[in-house]
Amino acid sequence: MSSIQVGIVMGSDSDLPIMEKCAEALTEFGVSYEMVVSSAHRHPEKTARYARGAADAGLKVIIAAAGGAAHLPGVIASMTLLPVIGVPIAIEPLQGVDSLYSIVQMPKGIPVATVTINGAYNAGLLAVEMLAMENEELKEKLNSYRQRLAAQVEKKDKSLREKMKSIRNLEQGEKE
Ligand code: RP5
């Protein structure tokens, strides 16, 4: 059994520029992953083989991305009990609304956790959160990540307040 925890499957190599953000999130948290190109329509046999073998191969979560008639995440979810996170990819001419609807509208019984259009980073982060349920170290890393986010908000708020203060001072000066 391999030590790879997350399988990132994409419908085409043209999805890679977006899906690199997913790999970035997993790398940030030290989570191992593999990237695979497969297609529900162009190579259904390969897709079925991958989905059916994923749990035995030791994977814990699958992230599947596709654009257009994006059936890849749902088809994979139908063939594994592993949690599947779907990433709708924006392509011409519908800019991802088609893939979002294709992925999010799963029939009752076969869920896919769908992130936003091109939301590859959040897909990676959600996989980390799933793995953190049984991993204290990951939990701690996620807590520090959240603290960094909060610190950024505080910094932006402080800078906005300072800007507003100097605008008010200027306006006051003009009136006098
Ligand atoms: C989908 O079709 C892929 O996931 C990709 O987003 C889109 C276009 O694929 P290519 O024509 O670029 O291979 O299945």
Image (cartoon, grey):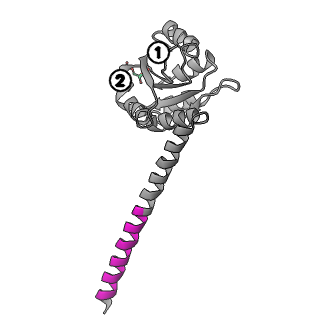
Along the viewing direction, whichever of 4 and 50 lies nearer the viewer? 4
N-terminal label among 1 and 2: 2
Judge whether residue 157 is colored magenta. Answer: yes
Quadrant of ligand 1: it is top left
Image: magenta residue range: 155-174
Along the viewing direction, whichever of 130 and 173 lies nearer the viewer? 130
Q: In the picture, residue 27 is in which quadrant?
A: top left
Q: Residue furthest right?
A: 109
Residue type highlighted by circle 1: Ser
The percent position of residue 20, horizontal first and vertical second, equals: 37, 30
* Magenta segment main secondary structure: helix
Secondary structure at numbered mark 1: loop
Q: Is residue 173 left or right of residue 130?
A: left
| Residue that carries the numbered disc 2 in the rendered image | 14
Q: In the picture, residue 18 is in which quadrant?
A: top left
Secondary structure at numbered mark 2: helix
The percent position of residue 73, horizontal first and vertical second, equals: 54, 23
Along the viewing direction, whichever of 32 and 34 lies nearer the viewer? 32
| Residue that carries the numbered disc 1 in the rendered image | 39
Q: Is residue 65 visible?
A: yes
The percent position of residue 152, horizontal first and vertical second, equals: 42, 57
Q: Which mark is residue 64?
A: none
- Asked if disc 1 is less than 8 Å from ligand 1, the answer is yes
* CA–CA distance in space, label 1 to label 2: 12 Å
Quadrant of the image for the C terminus? bottom left
Note whether 151 is above or below 87 in the view shown: below
Please report the residue visible at 57 percent of the width from the left and 35 percent of the height from the top: 135
The percent position of residue 146, horizontal first and vertical second, equals: 50, 50
